[in-house]
Image (spheres, rainbow, N blue to C red):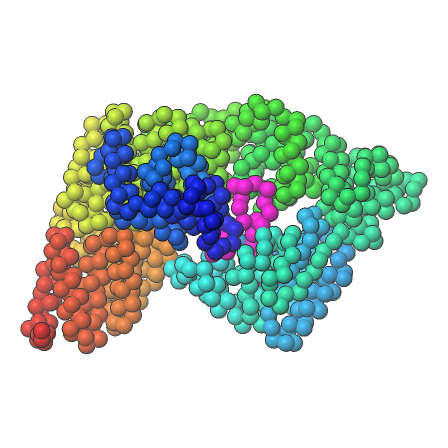
């Protein structure tokens, strides 16, 4: 995402003309234009806007439970949002100016800005330098200046920042990486951090990385647990600087968009060296040494070329090498490309190549010399290699493997691998990670232009269709390996005509999904917005269980696009399943209001098409939502209805889930033996159906109930079995809940320090995945463990955090638990009046929920009142 900007000021005629949403580059700017639109429309009240929206929705047949509230309408006009409810904002726009064309402009702007905001948070960070480039040569002057700056900074006890600036292709990144290795050989760094900030990526779907996301990655690499990473950007920057203080650290910030993008990423501590590369001047960086990098000197360029092609004879012209590098403008990228081209032409001398370059040379502009090098490198590839390069440039992700290349080209795997090796040898591809390849921005732009010129639109579409088929089919295979018991719920995907990896083993299936997760999200977005909506709908249905295991932000992106794609296709069944997946993801994240709206819409659509399993899934997630809100009667009703439908459909996996969910409700109401019976029934069904994920859930829940019943031995056994299954399947969300269960078990067994360890790990998982509901559980668990360890002040801190979050998301049971914990901690601190207030609040909440803890709290409150009544 571009660096944060001040809110846009309204133009002088902002309230006389309709604001243009297409000019907004961020969510804040879009909200600002929505405010202008409200004023333009006569500044109606929020209540009036809400009534107009609901009238339109009612006329469209939307159920009462999905109608908007005034508070949600007001939220649409608040700055500082990380996402917007697209349907509601579009409805608000229509209420303010019901012109279909104008409403369509807003819908498109929301898609673009919302997608860019999410894409900007996707960034890969590394805690090691990339390999020292073997082809590096020259740059002695620049290296000497860097070494001098480092020594001066060390003598002055100051941090050192070096901005390496220059046009694309001059080798800024190679210089930064080589300098890092060079300086580390003189004195090793204790910490190394590297990130590509994507400041100038040619694909709009790959916007500049958000500084907050980079800091999140850096802090994790520096050993900061997820739950300790602050949310706000300035606080993250402070935590980052504190973490690297007193260490000799090297930070490389590659391809920065501008100084603002990197300002918060500078460590600022003595002994730290930061190398920033950018195509722009970074004059805004404080106290930075600026290195403007031009092309090689003639001597450096020639040395680079001779090292790259040592076995090619010079021929009759002794100055041939000098002529070649001069035609390349002494630009490192161009010289490297020409070297690759030379290696591929056996029998030619350097003189022959110099003569050919002279023939092709058109003018003396430096940029054109890159184009000349690219053009020559491209033209002397075999036709199949040319075609593959063009097609790789169309790939929507950041990198790809040989299987994806084979799909694009419609060829076999050995041929694709051979072509990729040749393109890498010729510097037209770069190594991303072992077995994966990426394109330099300039090469991507050139190859994409060639594709537009040489490949007719139907051929390009066929190649991308093969690629999307490959990802969809391979994802389906991986999911069938990992979650075979739910295969009947996922769409049946035909095997592609191109090669696919062997994913028959769970480890291989999980590794593939993990390696391709970012790409799969990019593919889903690309397919939805570029003409393959059915692929996105099926990807959403295919990947749901994997994404639901701890990748909630990715799940939101995929399922939101799938829901819109199904709407574009007029596919009510696909839309219903995408809405169910979206609602289930939002429940995981504690976003209960939008979750309820999406699940109710899904249920209506499932009923319309007569999909019993779809109805049961929507009802199941509505039940989970109700239970997490403390609405146990409604939860039980939803789960009973889901159980009936699963049995009608003959779906034992679903039946087991419904039984387990009913067990959860029984347990919340204190009926622990009945809950245990439900979980044991679910466990039997899951094992019979081979549903290992359901089995893990049933085991973990059974262990929770057994803790309540005082059966600590069986509880420990069942919880550990659940943990083993979740870890075997890589289910991060399930692992987090099981860690929380272990924490409760250890507290019950009088081992509070071990409990704290488990709850902290659970909290880290929940915060990583955005599971705010789980975060309240872990915080309360930490508070209870701290109290058991005799640290009541620490318990207060955790319970207050749990209460604030539970209040925000509407989790009544965890609010009650936090209030009870605060009462207990305040009493231990000698604050009887405070304890009485908290216990009274807990009693009201528990009584409202009908939970058995009400009696225990009532007794604790009575004991305080009897010994030290509060004077009124």
- Choose between 349 and 51: the one closer to the eye: 51
Residue 641 percent location from the top left of the image: 18, 35
Residue 310 percent location from the top left of the image: 81, 46
Residue at 14% x, 52% y is 849
- Indicate left or right for 846 with 803 as reference: left
The total number of labels drawn is: 0
In the orientation shown, which residue stands out farthest toward the right? 316
- Choose between 791 and 55: the one closer to the eye: 55
In the rendered image of this protein, does residue 695 appear above or below residue 486?
below
Q: For residue 290, what is the image quadrant?
A: bottom right
- Indicate left or right for 799 with 35 as reference: left
Viewport quadrant of the C terminus: bottom left
Residue at 47% x, 33% y is 529
In the rendered image of this protein, does residue 111 appear above or below residue 727?
above
- Indicate left or right for 591 with 116 as reference: left
In the rendered image of this protein, does residue 453 appear above or below residue 319?
above
Residue 644 percent location from the top left of the image: 18, 32
Residue at 47% x, 26% y is 495
Q: Is residue 48 magenta?
A: no
- Residue segment shown in magenta: 190-212
Residue at 32% x, 53% y is 772
């Amino acid at each position: 995402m571009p660096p944060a900007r001040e809110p846009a000021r309204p133009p002088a005629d902002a309230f006389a003309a309709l604001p243009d949403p297409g000019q907004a580059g961020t969510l804040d700017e879009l909200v600002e234009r929505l405010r202008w639109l409200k004023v333009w429309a006569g500044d109606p009240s929020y209540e009036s806007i809400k009534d107009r929206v609901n009238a339109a929705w009612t006329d469209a047949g939307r159920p009462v439970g999905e109608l908007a509230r005034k508070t949600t309408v007001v939220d649409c006009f608040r700055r500082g949002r990380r996402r917007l409810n697209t349907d509601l904002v579009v409805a608000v726009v229509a209420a303010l100016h019901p012109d279909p064309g104008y409403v369509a402009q807003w819908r498109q702007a929301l898609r673009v800005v919302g997608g860019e905001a999410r894409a900007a948070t996707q960034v890969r960070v590394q805690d090691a330098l990339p390999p020292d480039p073997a082809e590096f040569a020259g740059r002695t002057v620049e290296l000497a200046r860097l070494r001098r700056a480092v020594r001066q900074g060390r003598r002055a006890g100051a941090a050192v920042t070096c901005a390496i600036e220059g046009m694309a292709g001059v080798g800024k990144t190679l210089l930064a990486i080589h300098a890092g290795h060079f300086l580390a050989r003189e004195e090793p760094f204790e910490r190394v951090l590297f990130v590509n900030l994507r400041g100038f990526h040619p694909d709009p779907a790959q916007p500049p990385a958000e500084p907050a996301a980079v800091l999140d990655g850096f802090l994790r690499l520096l050993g900061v647990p997820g739950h300790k990473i602050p949310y706000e950007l300035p606080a993250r920057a402070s935590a980052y600087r504190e973490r690297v203080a007193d260490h000799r650290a090297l930070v490389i910030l590659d391809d920065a968009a501008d100084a603002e993008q990197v300002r918060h990423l500078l460590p600022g501590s003595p002994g730290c060296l930061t190398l920033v590369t950018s195509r722009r001047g970074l004059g805004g960086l404080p106290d930075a040494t600026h290195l403007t990098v031009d092309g090689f000197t003639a001597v450096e360029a020639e040395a680079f070329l001779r090292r790259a092609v040592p076995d090619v004879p010079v021929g009759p012209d002794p100055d041939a090498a000098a002529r070649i590098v001069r035609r390349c403008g002494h630009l490192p990228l161009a010289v490297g490309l020409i070297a690759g081209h030379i290696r591929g032409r056996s029998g030619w001398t350097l003189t022959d190549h110099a003569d050919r370059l002279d023939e092709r040379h058109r003018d003396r502009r430096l940029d054109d010399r890159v184009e000349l090098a690219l053009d020559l490198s491209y033209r002397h590839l075999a036709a199949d290699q040319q075609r593959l390069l063009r097609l790789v440039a169309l790939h929507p992700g950041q990198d790809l493997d040989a299987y994806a290349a084979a799909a694009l080209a419609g060829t076999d795997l050995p041929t694709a691998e051979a072509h990729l090796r040749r393109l890498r040898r010729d510097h037209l591809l770069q190594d991303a990670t072992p077995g994966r390849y990426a394109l330099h921005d300039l090469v991507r732009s050139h190859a994409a232009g060639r594709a537009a010129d040489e490949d007719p639109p139907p051929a390009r579409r066929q190649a991308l269709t093969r690629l999307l088929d490959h990802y969809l089919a391979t994802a389906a295979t991986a999911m069938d390996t990992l979650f075979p018991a739910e295969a009947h719920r996922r769409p049946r995907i035909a095997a592609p005509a191109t090669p696919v990896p062997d994913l028959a083993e769970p480890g291989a299936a999980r590794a593939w999904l993990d390696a391709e997760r970012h790409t799969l999200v990019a593919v889903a977005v690309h397919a939805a917005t570029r003409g393959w909506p059915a692929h996105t709908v099926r990807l959403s249905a295919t990947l749901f269980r994997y994404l639901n295991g701890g990748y909630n932000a990715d799940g939101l992106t995929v399922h939101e696009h799938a829901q819109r794609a199904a709407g574009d296709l007029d596919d009510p069944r696909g839309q219903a399943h995408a809405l169910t997946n979206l609602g289930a993801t939002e429940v995981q994240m504690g976003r209960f209001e939008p979750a309820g709206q999406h699940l109710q819409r899904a249920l209506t659509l499932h009923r319309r098409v007569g999909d019993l399993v779809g109805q049961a899934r929507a009802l199941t997630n509505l039940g989970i939502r109700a239970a997490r809100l403390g609405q146990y009667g409604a939860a039980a009703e939803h789960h009973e209805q889901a159980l009936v439908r699963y049995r009608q459909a003959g779906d034992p996996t679903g039946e087991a889930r419904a039984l387990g969910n009913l067990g959860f409700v029984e347990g919340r109401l204190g009926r622990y033996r009945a809950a245990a019976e439900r979980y044991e029934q679910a466990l039997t069904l899951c094992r019979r159906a081979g549903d290992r994920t359901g089995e893990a859930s049933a085991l973990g829940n059974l262990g929770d109930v057994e803790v309540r019943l005082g059966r600590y031995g069986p509880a420990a056994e069942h919880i550990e079995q659940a943990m083993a299954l979740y870890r075997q399947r890589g289910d991060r969300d399930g692992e987090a809940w099981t860690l929380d269960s272990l924490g409760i078990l250890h507290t019950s067994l009088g081992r509070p320090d071990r409990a704290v360890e488990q709850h902290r790990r659970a909290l880290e998982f929940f915060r990583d995945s955005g599971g705010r509901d789980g975060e309240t559980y872990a915080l309360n668990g930490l508070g209870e463990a701290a109290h058991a360890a005799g640290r009541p002040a620490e318990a207060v801190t955790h319970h207050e955090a749990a209460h604030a979050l539970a209040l925000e998301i509407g989790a009544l049971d965890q609010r009650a638990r936090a209030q009870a914990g605060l009462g207990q901690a305040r009493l231990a601190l000698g604050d009887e009046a405070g304890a009485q207030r908290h216990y009274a609040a807990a009693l009201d909440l528990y009584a409202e929920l009908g939970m058995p803890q009400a009696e225990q709290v009532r007794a604790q409150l009575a004991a305080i009142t009897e010994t030290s009544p509060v004077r009124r």
